[in-house]
Amino acid sequence: MDSKSTSDSSEVVGVIGAGSFGTAVANLIAKNTNALVYARNPKTVASINDDRVCAGQSISASVRATNSEQELAESCRLIFPIVPSDKFRSMIRDFSPYLNPNHVLIHGTKGLDVQLNDNEDLFDLQEISRTQISTMSEVIQQETSVVRLGNLAGPNLSGELAQDQPAGSLIASPFDEVSRLGKMALNSGRFKIFESKDMLGAEYAGVLKNIFAIASGMVDGLGFGNNARAFLITKSLHEMLFIGQKSGANSKAFLGIAGIGDLIATCSSNLSRNYNVGRRLAEGESLSQIVATSREVAEGIRTVKIFDMLTKAEGIQAPITNTLAEILFADLSPETALIKLMSFNFSQDVTFI
Amino acid sequence: MDSKSTSDSSEVVGVIGAGSFGTAVANLIAKNTNALVYARNPKTVASINDDRVCAGQSISASVRATNSEQELAESCRLIFPIVPSDKFRSMIRDFSPYLNPNHVLIHGTKGLDVQLNDNEDLFDLQEISRTQISTMSEVIQQETSVVRLGNLAGPNLSGELAQDQPAGSLIASPFDEVSRLGKMALNSGRFKIFESKDMLGAEYAGVLKNIFAIASGMVDGLGFGNNARAFLITKSLHEMLFIGQKSGANSKAFLGIAGIGDLIATCSSNLSRNYNVGRRLAEGESLSQIVATSREVAEGIRTVKIFDMLTKAEGIQAPITNTLAEILFADLSPETALIKLMSFNFSQDVTFI
């Protein structure tokens, strides 16, 4: 009994965002049912509908695109919003008039929404309040009447998904119905969906791993090998868990495919922007040089800044994050940082369970 | 206050075994105090004492070698036995007359001792009993009067240790005194020792990870990338945890530097014999071809056979181990195995906590 036979084949599943991951998700849905992709740009819509290509990927026959928020919301009960975190709130506000409590939203965005006052720059701040940051599910709750929410997260590099390589991912939701619907839409013989109730943990894991991807790139840039990287990833997992627990998440998602799984993939991939920031820093470039030559600022740099402030204010033990902040924002050299981290007094191996 | 100043500098710490890891450990000890290495072969002893080289590594000035069991046991209270698992019991029997309850033994061997009847071959067996297999700490308990035992385990590729690359490792022991003594002997600015009471978990993690290193090599040999490898490592961790819990270990070591840490390093290193067995199988060679052209059988092949029998007999869910056994011993193709594994019904993400 495959998932296709148990779902209504006339059902259309929505995707908001036609970036590389959104496009890959639409093609995955198309293995099971029809997909409708929302793209703001009419050229992107035409490229999908007419040229059958988007974000470097061929488009399955069962995928169609629109730039009408209303059409997407009225055609689809199940919708996967997948847009960059800094555009997420404005996107969801545009959709809000068309969304109702019958909709099911499973977002696939790894990042935080940060609310600053006018003329404030995140990187000039000395402190930030929890109330200023929101996960994407919190943004949806703040901006819409939708109740049934979920998060799609895992080690899912789009390029590999587009090649139909095997992968696993998590749908985390407090509602079994949401995980079930999401699984019916996405699960296939090459894409294995796992279920969890730990939505906040999955969201925090997806955000925090970008911090440690910078650190991993740095370890490689310093010329170190498998011992050092495995050491770093292990302690990164523990630090993610501490921060997540103090942020109200439980531990489960951190130990699963969206936690340790995504952390391993991101820390091992030289395709990751965050990883490359770390590598270039270790090779001697300054942050300003790196930012000046990058098309967009790696999400992890903002994430380091946010959690450096939060962990210090809240007394959370986060030596890797705090040391990275010194490297990024106070010119500590990666070599000196390494000596500092190796002498940090974390003597017990595992303390979080 | 470094560890050197808190230990008696006249104290000599012993190492049994002059392979690549034993030699690396002796050099690490030599950063803090004097090391005495036991090697059975007089040529190895001469190479260490006279040529100052062993296992491709230069020997620190504070390292000396002997081939007298009695001299080592009488000179050293703290001893690190580091010999291959299939030679461990006979080695410890040779030392037994010279060991007493005042000795502290911290072994660094990742493998199991298997007791078979005369003329029995492990690979011909259909079943095996728990009473036939022992961890190295259990072998020491069976063969000597030593009480204070520990296990040194972590992502510690010898070649990288010899280059003084940073690394972390675990000393697991039920006795705080053992962990403290081991840490004083080994901890340095480049080699960070963590402590845990979960000795059995650390031993099982070191044994079981070899199974999943074969699987990881296979994923790479099939041409798959970061998504598939991160997926496999995550589910491998979960399977290790299940098997370990059913074997009487708790979960802690599996989630620390000797568990997930060592698993990541071993599954990512093409220096690992087990990894290369998997890669070659995926590239089309048969197990008999691989064994015929290898100097020694990769530990992981025996480990798959042992835990395939144990998990089936005890009803433990171990789809990766059981599928690997079909590939190794029943000619299932890696491609078919992948389809089988992807359709396995493990729906929940994390169930072990």
Image (cartoon, coloured by chain):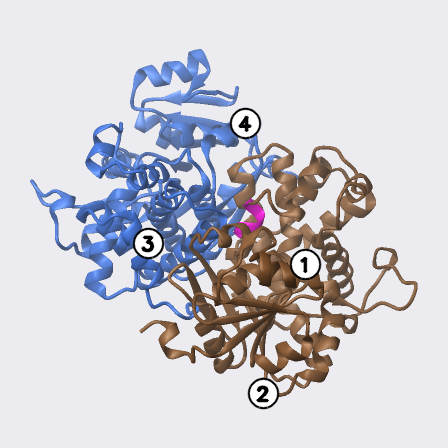
Chain colours: A blue, B brown
The answer to whether residue B267 is magenta is yes
Question: Which numbered circle lies on residue B102?
Answer: 2
SS at mark 1 in the image:
loop
Nearer the observer, disc 2 or disc 1? Answer: 2
Q: Are marks 2 and 4 on the same chain?
A: no
In the visual, does B285 lie left or right of B235?
Answer: right
Which residue is more in the foreground, A341 or A233?
Answer: A341
Secondary structure of the residue carrying tag 2 is loop
Mark 3 → mark 2, Cα distance in angstroms: 38 Å
In the picture as drawn, the residue positioned furthest to the right comes out as: B119
Q: Which residue is mark 1?
A: B317
Tell me the quadrant of the picture where the N terminus of chain A can be found. top right
Where is residue B131? Give x, y as percent.
78, 74
Reply yes or no: does residue B164 show up in magenta. Answer: no
How far separated are the C-alphas under marks 2 and 4? 60 Å
Same chain, marks 3 and 2?
no
Q: Work out which residue is located at the far front of the displayed protein and give it.
A: B50
In percent of width and height, residue A346 lies at: 37, 67
The label number, if any, that marks residue A338 in the structure image? 3
Tell me the residue that label 4 is attached to: A163
Q: Earlier in the sequence, mark 2 or mark 1?
A: 2
Which residues are drawn in magenta? B264-268
> Which of labels 1 and 3 is toward the front?
3
Label 3 and label 4 in one chain: yes
What is the C-alpha distance between the residues marked 1 and 3?
41 Å
Characterize the magenta stretch by its predominant secondary structure. helix
Residue type highlighted by circle 2: Asn
